[in-house]
Image (cartoon, helix red, strand yellow):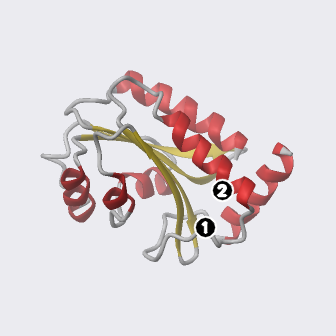
Amino acid sequence: GPRLLTARLAALAHRAGLGPAAEGTVSPLAGLTPREIEVLQLVADRALELSPDTNAAGVSLPLKKGSLSAFAGNGRIELESLAAAPEPGPGSDAAGQGRAQVVRSLIVEKRWPEFTNRALYCGAQSVLACPLSGDGQVIGSVVFYSSQEGGFGAHQAGVGQGFAHGAAVLL
């Protein structure tokens, strides 16, 4: 049930050190059951409903050797290349700092040059990343992508953080 799933993912995050995702491969073979991976994908699918400007979303759980991620989109942003976007990025910073990262324009963003170049190449123009946190622990991040500049602001950050908290409880 949900409590067992929460306990297993919390233990996984604890073993991973609860820090930002390290570089590595994305693998579903990280000790998660198919049901747990299905729930991770469901969270990514539901994240698309944040706002009309959300065109893609990703959920990432840091592991010792890489990260486990799930992505969903509506076709306006190329997901396969986006899933390979290098870290650090807004998701790893949201998880590492425990607070939302709002990027209103990737065109002028300077903090994560490799991530920014990949995200722009995929069609993203703005990003909102929120830590997945519950019970005082950060277990990962949920990242919302928009093909519009200025797609996310303070209101969406609040809604996104609420979504991320609820998702963390589910996970």
Residue nearest the viewer, comparing 84 with 127: 84
* Residue at the outermost front position: 75
The three-letter code of the residue at mark 2 reads: Ile
Q: Residue at x 53, y 39 (%)?
A: 45
Q: Is residue 86 above or below residue 54?
A: below
Q: Position of residue 155 (x, y in %)?
A: 40, 21
Label 1, label 2: how far apart the Cα atoms are: 7 Å
Location of residue 129 by image quarter: top left
- Residue 137 in sight: no
Q: Position of residue 64 (x, y in %)?
A: 58, 76
Neighbor class of circle 2 (other Cα within 10 Å; few <14, some 14-19, many 20+) is some
- The earlier-in-sequence mark between 1 and 2 is 1
Q: Position of residue 99 (x, y in %)?
A: 47, 43
Residue closest to the eye, 130 or 34: 34
Q: Are marks 1 and 2 in contact (CB under 8 Å)?
A: yes
Which quadrant holds the N terminus? top right
* Residue that carries the numbered disc 2 in the rendered image: 37
Name the foreground residue: 3 vs 158.
3
Q: Is residue 126 left or right of residue 84?
A: left
Viewer-closest of 69 and 103? 69
Vertical comparison of 17 with 128: above or below: below
Looking at the picture, how far across and down is residue 6, in whole percent?
77, 50
Q: In the drawing, what numbered circle is on residue 28?
A: 1
**Which element is circle 1 on?**
loop
Instruction: Name which residue type carries label 1.
Output: Pro
